[in-house]
């Protein structure tokens, strides 16, 4: 008696070859038979009219950060993901023996140690964080190194398979503590290498660096190359959030994006390691950004730069977020950039009332126009107002109009329009797409044969949000948390379904050196997703993204049914996958 048989499916096996029709049997967590059969099984799924494919691989995820707290990982499962690759952008929940490094999901805990309202510290002490994490998530924070983190996942169980990079930022924090705004000296780099060695020995698939985030942004070439020598020795991969924005603080300056991509390519080439360029975007700024011809041209030039290094012998791939929302978090409140001021006032209403004070209004306007508030900084984003679209407001005729358009109608500049709108309705919600990211350049970057898909988001449930205080703007999980894979399937697919699935499965598995996942073949792990492509629906909201998409009927993780008939089963059949 087998564990499972899937009958009458349209098999898209992950290799890119044409669809074929047959049955698939599963036993002991692996695919045991492919072909028409009368095998008896404990569970039989009739997949008539549906696609049977390998489980999707989210190659750039922060689900490793959330997994200790949301172990069922429903938001990944409900979009067909059975394996995610975490430890990205230099973030990782370990090591943390000396300091806990900020990873967004615990921002409410870290905020308690802030010296300034509305500021999230980069570091926290483990002994201080432990009770706060217990209170917030109901989970014991009882690991301190990479191996301990892996043990935590194995003991408590996880719903989705996880691979993870060693996070350079987390490692750097342990060695440099609060003195991280400088290059490291050789003795400090040696200490970092000890942490990296521990992680690689415990199964890390390589090392990731976050060049736009503290403390990783302060590392110099010498430091990264020394650490990459260890990555090379273990046969690991170098993943990088390349220098795109620079430090995201007040009075930040604009950067040359392509220089950040070149920096990553040069580091990997000198270190002779495989490179994964994280959430690739075009390396050039185009204005106006909605010019599709120029947008695609900038993507072509970016890919040409990467391909030039490939021709020199560098093994390099990239992943793309299939959405213009960016990753990790969504801040739909128009007032979020003024969170600090709202906290000082005590409520949104009190802030709105204070905007009637002409001197306060003018001081705040000066802060914006001089670049002192990063998220509304005309000096680094000339299109900030055109990219801000009203989604809900007391003025119904503002719906789906840009702040620039509304301000012009009010016969005022956009900064004045922004503050006027906040004064009249501090609960206004908006959508701000990523700067320089358009559907046309996403499509071009994804279409490249070396591209795969990453959601750049957590793996959680439907309850999570991140409030700073009562009656204040708050963060939600990014829409990709729930429907990133659906955006790819519905909006940016390849010409053939078989090629689309290949990017999500066989290609991603090959990049990560996974020999027994990503392809439906006898002996491989039984990670399987079953769906009808004609019935997929995003079911998405940009004001509160906490909703599952529609259309994934069944998800099998290591032979166990984790989603049945569109409902999560709250199983814990995922595994931590060590580097192959």
Image (cartoon, rainbow, N blue to C red):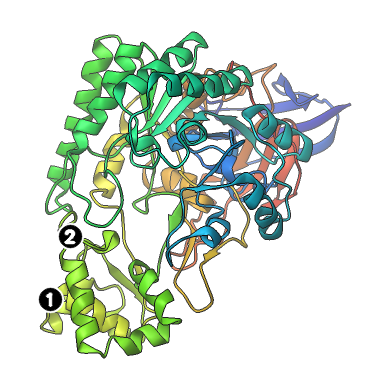
Question: Where residue 360 sits: x, y (%)?
Answer: 24, 83
> How many discs appear?
2
The reply to whether residue 358 is in sight is: yes
Q: Earlier in the sequence, mark 2 or mark 1?
A: 2
Label 1 crowding class (10 Å Cα cut-off): few <14, some 14-19, many 20+?
Answer: some
The reply to whether residue 494 is in sight is: no
Label 2 crowding class (10 Å Cα cut-off): few <14, some 14-19, many 20+?
Answer: some
Callout 2: SS: loop
Question: In the image, is 301 to the left or to the right of 564?
Answer: left
State the image quarter where residue 44 is shown.
Answer: top right
Question: In the image, is 566 to the left or to the right of 444?
Answer: right
Callout 1: SS: loop
Q: In this view, does 10 lie above or below 398?
A: above
Residue, far right: 1
Question: Where residue 78 sits: x, y (%)?
Answer: 61, 49
Dot label at residue 151: none
Rounded to the nearest angstrom, the CA distance separating label 2 from label 1 is 13 Å
Q: Mark 1 points at which residue?
A: 413
Between 92 and 528, the one lying in front of the other is: 92
Question: Where residue 412 sits: x, y (%)?
Answer: 12, 81
State the image quarter where residue 298 is shown.
Answer: top left
Q: Is residue 217 above or below residue 345?
A: above
Question: Where residue 365 sits: x, y (%)?
Answer: 19, 74
Between 383 and 193, the one lying in front of the other is: 193
Query: What residue is shown at x 34% (from left), y 30% (from top)?
Result: 219
Question: In the image, is 297 to the left or to the right of 137?
Answer: left
Dot label at residue 383: 2
For the C terminus, give its image quadrant: top right
């Amino acid at each position: 008696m087998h564990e499972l048989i899937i009958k009458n499916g349209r098999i898209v096996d992950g290799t890119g070859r044409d669809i074929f029709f047959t049955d698939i049997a599963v036993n002991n967590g692996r695919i045991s038979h492919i072909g028409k059969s009368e095998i008896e099984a404990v569970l039989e799924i009739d997949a008539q009219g549906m696609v049977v494919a390998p489980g999707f691989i989210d190659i750039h995820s922060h689900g490793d950060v959330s997994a200790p707290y949301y172990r069922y990982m429903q938001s990944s499962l409900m979009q067909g993901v059975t394996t995610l690759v975490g430890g990205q952008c230099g973030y990782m929940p370990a090591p943390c023996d000396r300091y806990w490094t900020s990873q967004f999901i615990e921002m409410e805990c870290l905020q308690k140690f802030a010296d300034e309202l509305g500021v999230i510290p980069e570091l926290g002490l483990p002994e201080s964080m432990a009770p706060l994490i217990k209170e917030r998530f109901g989970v014991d924070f009882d690991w301190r190194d990479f191996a301990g983190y892996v043990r935590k996942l194995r003991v408590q169980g996880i719903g989705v398979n996880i691979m993870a990079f060693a996070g350079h930022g987390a490692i750097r924090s342990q060695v440099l503590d609060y003195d991280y705004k400088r290059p490291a000296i050789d003795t400090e780099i040696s200490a970092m290498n000890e942490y990296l060695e521990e992680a690689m020995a415990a199964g890390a698939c390589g090392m990731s660096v976050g060049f736009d985030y503290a403390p990783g942004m302060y590392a110099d070439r010498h430091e990264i190359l020394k650490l990459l020598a260890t990555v090379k020795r273990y046969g690991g991969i170098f993943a990088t959030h390349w220098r795109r924005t620079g430090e995201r603080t007040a009075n930040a300056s604009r950067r040359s994006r392509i220089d950040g991509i070149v920096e990553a390519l040069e580091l990997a080439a000198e270190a002779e390691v495989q490179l994964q360029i994280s959430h690739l975007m075009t390396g050039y700024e185009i204005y106006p950004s909605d010019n599709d011809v120029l947008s695609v041209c900038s993507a072509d030039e970016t890919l040409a730069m990467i391909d030039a290094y490939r021709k020199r012998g560098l093994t390099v791939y990239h992943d793309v977020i299939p959405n213009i929302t960016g990753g990790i978090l969504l801040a739909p409140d128009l007032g979020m950039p003024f969170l600090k001021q709202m906290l000082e006032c005590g409520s949104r209403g009190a802030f709105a009332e204070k905007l009637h004070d002409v001197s306060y209004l003018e001081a705040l306007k000066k802060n914006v126009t001089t670049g002192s508030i990063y998220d509304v900084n005309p000096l680094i984003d000339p299109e900030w107002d055109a990219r801000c679209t009203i989604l809900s407001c007391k003025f119904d005729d503002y719906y789906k109009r840009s702040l620039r358009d509304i301000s012009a109608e009010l016969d005022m500049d956009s900064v004045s329009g922004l503050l006027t709108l906040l004064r009249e309705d501090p609960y206004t919600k908006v959508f701000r797409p990523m700067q320089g990211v358009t559907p046309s350049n996403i499509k071009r970057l994804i279409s490249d044969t070396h591209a795969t898909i990453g959601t750049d988001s957590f793996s959680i449930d439907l309850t999570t949000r991140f409030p700073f205080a009562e009656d204040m703007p708050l963060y939600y999980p990014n829409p990709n948390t729930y429907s990133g894979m659906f955006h790819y399937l519905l909006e940016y697919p390849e010409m053939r379904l078989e090629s689309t699935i290949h990017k999500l499965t066989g290609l991603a598995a090959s990049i990560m050196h996974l020999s027994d996942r990503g392809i439906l073949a006898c002996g491989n792990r039984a990670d399987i997703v079953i769906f009808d492509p004609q019935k997929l629906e995003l079911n998405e909201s940009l004001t509160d993204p906490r909703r599952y998409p529609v259309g994934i009927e069944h998800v099998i993780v290591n032979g166990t049914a984790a989603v049945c008939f569109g409902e999560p089963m709250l199983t814990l059949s995922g595994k931590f996958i060590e580097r192959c």
